[in-house]
Amino acid sequence: MAMNHIRSLTSVKVAKEAVQYVGQRTFSAGAGKAKKGSKGAASDAPKASTLSKEVKSTTVVGANILKDGADPKILPDSEYPDWLWHLLHKRPALSELRRKNIETLPYEDLKRFVKLDNRARIKENNSVKAKN
């Protein structure tokens, strides 16, 4: 039993030393050389955009997530699904829904009211339990 324990400690020590050599951070060869007359502050300044205004207005710049892909083109509004434009609408808050008559609420607002009211009651109950 003791011999197994010693062997495991020895292997841990060897593995730790191996990790130190393998996991040692190094820097690239060109990083240490500084350009003459460069203080470093000039390279930190934001660079002017090299894209033309025409390209910016016809493509979604930066939306590409693939290595070999291209940025998607902006399509006319008619090419997008109708539900997309409803995402921009503000949905009523719980206080606003409480002020309205529940019998006259549309189904979507009634569903939202029940969800928000349940959430508020759960938070209230949890805060009461936490104080006790």
Image: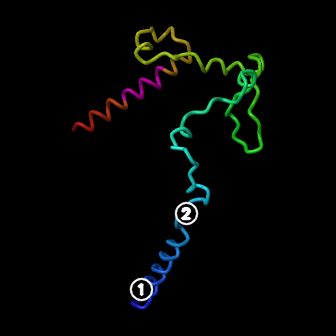
Residue type highlighted by circle 1: His
Q: Residue furthest left?
A: 132
Q: In this rendering, would 32 be left or right of 81?
A: left
Residue placed under numbered mark 2 in the picture: 26
Residue 8: say if magenta.
no
Question: Which circle, 1 or 2, is nearer the viewer?
Answer: 2
Please, is residue 130 above or below residue 51 in the view?
A: below
Q: What residue is drawn where x is 67% and y is 22%?
A: 84
Q: Which residues are magenta?
A: 113-121
Residue 6, located in which quarter of the rendered image? bottom left
Image spot of residue 10 (x, y percent): 45, 84
> On the picture, is 125 further left or further right than 27?
left
Amino acid of disc 2: Thr
Residue in the picture at 63% in, 18% down: 86
Q: How many marks?
A: 2
Please identify the quadrant where the N terminus is shown: bottom left
Q: Position of residue 102 (x, y in %)?
A: 46, 12
Label 1 to label 2: alpha-carbon separation: 35 Å
Image position of 107 (left or right of 100): right
Mark 2 Cα-neighbour bin, 10 Å: few <14, some 14–19, many ≥20: few
Residue on which disc 1 sits: 5
Classed neighbour count for the residue bearing mark 1: other residues with Cα under 10 Å, few (<14), some (14–19), many (≥20): few
Magenta span dominant secondary structure: helix
Q: What residue sits 53% from the left and 67% below the top?
A: 23
Pick the front one: 18 or 105: 18
- 13 to 73, vertically: above or below: below
Q: Secondary structure at mark 1?
A: helix
Q: Earlier in the sequence, mark 1 or mark 2?
A: 1
